[in-house]
Image (spheres, coloured by chain):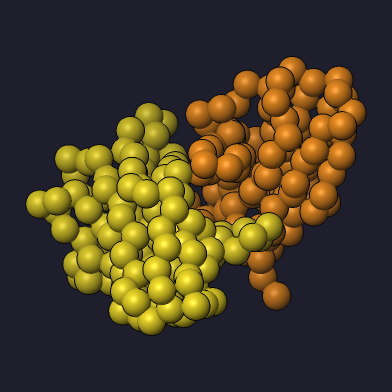
Chain colours: A yellow, B orange
Amino acid sequence: AQSVTQLGSHVSVSEGALVLLRCNYSSSVPPYLFWYVQYPNQGLQLLLKYTSAATLVKGINGFEAEFKKSETSFHLTKPSAHMSDAAEYFCAVSDWDSGGYQKVTFGTGTKLQVIP
Amino acid sequence: DGGITQSPKYLFRKEGQNVTLSCEQNLNHDAMYWYRQDPGQGLRLIYYSQIVNDFQKGDIAEGYSVSREKKESFPLTVTSAQKNPTAFYLCASSMGQAMNTEAFFGQGTRLTVV
């Protein structure tokens, strides 16, 4: 079964600084990867998804992620952090289970703090 | 508006009682999922379903049960056998027909055992 690992449960950046949130996947075949954002006491919202059409994926709110097969990574970046970016971010991978059904597995999440 | 509705938003349960969390979607999605969220543990999959009257156990199914009698509904019952049920529960749905289809989430139900 495929899985994702998020390095760093908490990340702090200054407002205006680069945001880098790390995600590595475990797969020998091209995975389908996603980044979601969660604000307190709310559900998750899709930021972007990798579907093999392009290695650099642009998402909402100025976020983007680059798929690097050689590093098995799909890190999320944003050039300039805004206070409204403070939230928890989840990397996820989509896979088939043994019965041929889609199964989506999430990482443990990274809380982003933006310092004024 | 299309989306996923979870109810109630907050739920309190006495120890030893079963409780059912509601999840309804009007996106015409085939696949539905239940996740449990605890601080520092991310989202853990409880049950998932791709078609009506069929569902699969996820990674932490013990102490939970589900049904899928209608395409748009996927209720989760937290039974008294679940030893630590206090958590934030999230329901999601997706088209389920291809791996690149994203999941859409409800707003969650926070369950507290008192």
* x 69%, y 33%: residue: B66
Looking at the image, which residue is at 52% across and 31% down?
B58
User: Is A104 on the left or on the right of A32, as rendered?
Assistant: right
Can the viewer see residue A111?
yes
- Quadrant for residue A41, please give it: bottom right
As drawn, A27 above or below B85? below
For the view shown, which residue lies furthest in the top direction?
B81
Which residue is rendered at x = 65% and y = 35% of the image? B53
Numbered marks: total: 0
**Which residue is outermost to the front?**
A116
The quadrant in which the N terminus of chain A is found is top left
**Which one is in front, A21 or B3?**
A21
On screen, residue B91 versus residue A54, left or right, reads right
Residue B56 occupies which quadrant of the picture?
Answer: top right
Query: Image quadrant of residue B64?
Result: top right
Which residue: 60% across, 64% down? A39
For the question of whether residue A102 can be seen, the reply is: no
Give percent across and percent down for residue B43.
Answer: 53, 43
> Residue B107 at what x, y percent from top left?
69, 59
Whole-percent x, y for residue B36 in the image: 61, 40
Question: Is residue A12 left or right of A23 when viewed as pictured?
Answer: right
Q: Is B51 or A44 nearer to us in this picture?
A: A44
Q: Is residue B36 above or below residue B9?
A: above
Q: Closer to the camera, B65 or B54? A: B65
